[in-house]
Image (tube, rainbow, N blue to C red):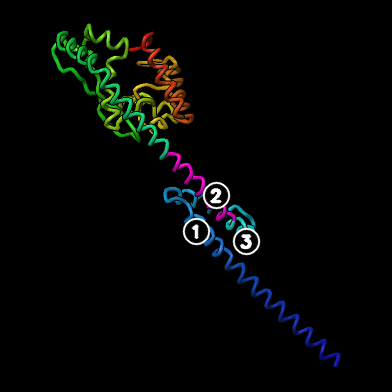
Amino acid sequence: MGMTVGLAVFVSGILATTLARVFADEFKAWMPWVAERFVRKAVAGLPEDQRERFGEEWRSHLNEIPGEIGKLVVAFGFIFAAWKMSSILKIEHSRGWVRDGLKRTVDVSFSVAGLFLLAPLLLAFATLIKLDSPGPILSRRLRIGLNGRQFYCYKLRTQTVINGVPKVTNIGRFLRKYSCDELPELLNVLRGDMTLVGPRPGTPEFHRFLNGAMPGSQERNAVKPGITGWAQVNGFRGETADVALMNKRIQLDLWYINNWSFWLDLWIMARTCVVVLRPRNAY
């Protein structure tokens, strides 16, 4: 009887050990598949424009984790991380809609009011431009706007061509001194090409130079260009030929983008009214 029980225990032990090894091998073989399913589940919970990026990053990170169990635990953690990220991104997206809607409302309201109130002054400038030199009242200049899109920026004409050489007119010199030549840019604001407050728009050539000389300057294209901006009320009006000063101007633009608020826009617009009365570095 005792031998029978002992034999049964011995056989059971062998069977249990064999089955444990079989299940362990199967579990080990299935774990990479399960981990991949966790990653796919996590990636599917992200916004569509973020899926490819985080899918690659998470899979690369997973390959660095030692042990199959560790990989499984980390992959499962990605699901929770994706849920948290998705919630944050949705909040930021809704805030972006509120910010853009508020900014657009201010742009349209102030532009319409400005064009109405400044109509007599614009009419006087238009008359002086026609009397001063032949040519159109408005000039169009190609500029780079939101997301690198090109558009034509409207200005009061301040130059004429004499013997094939561009010359600043008498009225043009006054208009540039007090930045009055930029008043027609209110039309660009109404069209949606520009905003009241933002980085000043640059030429295609200027943007190509910045992209090569100052990495990170492309972030300025993440917002619409403005008639005035944080850099302008801090002494950077007009052209900036010095590279060091140009970099400082870019940093001021980036600071504005990262610290935007409705009240900051109002302060910049109020400050602009003071700055233009004390002309400095205008062209």
The amino acid on which the numbered mark 2 sits, given as a three-letter code, is Lys
Assign the C terminus to one quadrant of the image: top left
- Disc 3 + disc 1, Cβ < 8 Å: no
Q: Which residues are magenta?
A: 77-96
* Residue of label 1: 40
The amino acid on which the numbered mark 1 sits, given as a three-letter code, is Arg
Q: Nearer the viewer, mark 2 or mark 3?
A: 2
In the rendered image of this protein, does residue 105 appear above or below residue 230?
Answer: below
Residue 73 in the image: state x and y as whole percent. Answer: 62, 58
- Residue under the point 22% across and 15% down: 120
Main SS class of the magenta portion in the image: helix
- Residue under the point 64% across and 56% down: 66
Tally the numbered discs.
3
Mark 1: which secondary structure? Answer: helix
Sequence-first tag of 3 and 1: 1
* Residue of label 2: 84
The amino acid on which the numbered mark 3 sits, given as a three-letter code, is Glu
- Confirm whether the magenta stretch covers residue 132: no
Sequence-first tag of 1 and 2: 1
